[in-house]
């Protein structure tokens, strides 16, 4: 398969530690401090100390260089590589950590992502995305506008109602209300979501996530080390990352290339992850899907293969994606309730699925002990990373 990560099976690699800082506005706490909190939580979870880590990868969009965290963690001299890959930063750091184990370069590796964004919308510079300055002057760098255009087209083509968007956001706030690490911990009704200020039609204020603050860290280990550390490991069956192909309609796109239905980078990454894991979407017991706004979760349900396009209207109406549904999605509240600190989001997703597969999610725990979990992140200008995780029998 093409691509650096390739979607190949990740044999003999387990997640042995997962940690988060709290998400949301934290005056006086820097992004670096949140990263250190998350790392210590992940190390404690794994039952190891910083000197046990042999290699590390991490990054943020705007809160500093991850390698400089060694000033606070300890000057052990290990390789620590900075990663910056938009919303896929955390996932890309995890890719690198996993590959270091698979290659035999290390037996214990760490991935960390963190960010502390100011209030207001993201403010990308066209030049950083390979676009002329005039692109921004014409108003084409507004992400909320892009998301609205994309979901408007999708709703028209597949019979999705605005009421469904409100249901998705209300679910996120309900799940966030029982997640002690979430930013938005007040449940909102569908009516409150629908009646909030219009941002870009049909998406209202409470259908969007907000730039946020937080850190997340994951420790991965070889099969031998994982067995020695105990039974709280979660096996990483596969991982895949892809960039956009021709015909996609991505963030900052002014139009669709080519003819026919747009291609989907999320579909490509998800299909590769499922193929490598030897399982299908129907086998998944809990999932994390990127929900930059409510329409994204709707589209990603189909793009990742969990249902057919257009079936989301019925799925969501009958509660299929609720914590008690057939496919619980974003059980921690997703980006809508947690906000999006860009560097941390992908690893937050992995943390939540690990917590669910261990049966340690408390009030938001999926009943019946799910065996398989899935994570999906999507970011500008068209990159997606997916993982398939498996609970280890306890």
Image (spheres, helix red, strand yellow):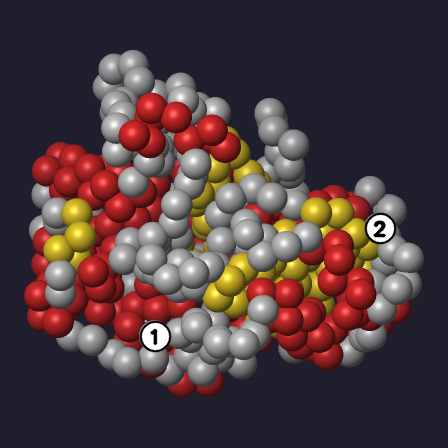
Secondary structure of the residue carrying tag 2 is: loop
The quadrant holding residue 142 is top left
Examine the rendered structure and indicate whether residue 242 appears above or below residue 340: above
Q: Residues within 10 Å of mark 2 (few under 14, many from 20)?
A: few
Instruction: Give the x, y percent position of residue 209.
Output: 33, 59
Tell me which residue sits at (43%, 44%) in the image: 378
**Front residue of this view, candidates 343 and 363:** 343
Kindly identify which residue carries mark 1. 184
Examine the rendered structure and indicate whether residue 262 appears above or below residue 285: above
Kindly identify which residue carries mark 2. 79
Tell me which residue sits at (69%, 55%) in the image: 66
Quadrant of the frame with the C terminus: bottom right
**Front residue of this view, candidates 385 and 234:** 385
Quadrant of the frame with the N terminus: top right
Which numbered circle lies on residue 207? none
> In the orientation shown, which residue stands out farthest toward the bottom?
363
Q: Is residue 143 left or right of residue 20?
A: left
């Amino acid at each position: 398969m093409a691509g650096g990560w390739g979607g190949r099976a990740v044999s003999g690699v387990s997640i042995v530690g997962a940690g988060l800082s709290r998400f949301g506005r934290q005056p006086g706490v820097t992004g670096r401090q949140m990263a250190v909190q998350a790392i210590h939580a992940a190390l404690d979870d794994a039952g190891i100390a910083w000197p046990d880590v042999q290699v590390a990868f991490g990054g943020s969009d705007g809160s500093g260089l991850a390698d400089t965290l060694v000033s606070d963690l300890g000057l052990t001299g290990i390789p620590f590589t900075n990663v910056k890959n938009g919303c896929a930063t955390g996932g890309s750091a995890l890719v690198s950590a996993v590959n270091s184990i698979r290659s035999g370069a290390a037996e214990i590796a760490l991935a960390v992502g963190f960010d502390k964004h100011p209030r207001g919308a993201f403010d990308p510079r066209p030049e950083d995305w390979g676009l002329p300055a005039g692109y921004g002057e014409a108003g084409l760098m507004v992400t909320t506008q892009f998301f609205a255009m994309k979901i408007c087209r999708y709703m028209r083509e597949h019979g999705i109602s605005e009421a469904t968007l409100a249901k998705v956001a209300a679910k996120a706030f309900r799940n966030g209300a029982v997640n002690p690490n979430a930013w938005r911990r007040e449940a909102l009704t569908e009516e409150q979501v629908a009646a909030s200020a219009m941002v870009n039609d049909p998406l209202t204020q409470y259908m969007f996530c907000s730039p946020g603050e937080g850190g997340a860290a994951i420790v991965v280990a070889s099969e031998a080390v994982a067995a020695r550390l105990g039974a709280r490991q979660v096996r990483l069956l596969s991982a895949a990352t892809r960039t956009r192909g021709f015909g996609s309609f991505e963030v900052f796109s002014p139009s669709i290339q080519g003819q026919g239905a747009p291609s989907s980078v999320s579909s490509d990454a998800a299909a590769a992850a499922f193929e490598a894991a030897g399982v299908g979407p129907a086998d998944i017991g809990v999932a994390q899907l990127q929900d930059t706004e409510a329409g994204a979760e709707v589209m990603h349900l189909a793009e990742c293969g969990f249902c057919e396009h257009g079936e989301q209207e019925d799925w969501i109406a009958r509660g299929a994606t609720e914590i008690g549904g057939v496919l619980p999605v974003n059980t921690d509240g997703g980006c809508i309730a947690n906000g999006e600190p860009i560097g941390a989001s992908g690893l937050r997703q992995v943390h939540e699925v690990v917590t669910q597969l261990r049966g340690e999610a408390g009030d938001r725990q999926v009943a019946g002990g799910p065996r398989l979990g899935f994570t999906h992140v999507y970011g500008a200008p068209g990159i997606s990373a997916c993982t398939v995780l498996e609970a280890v029998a306890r």
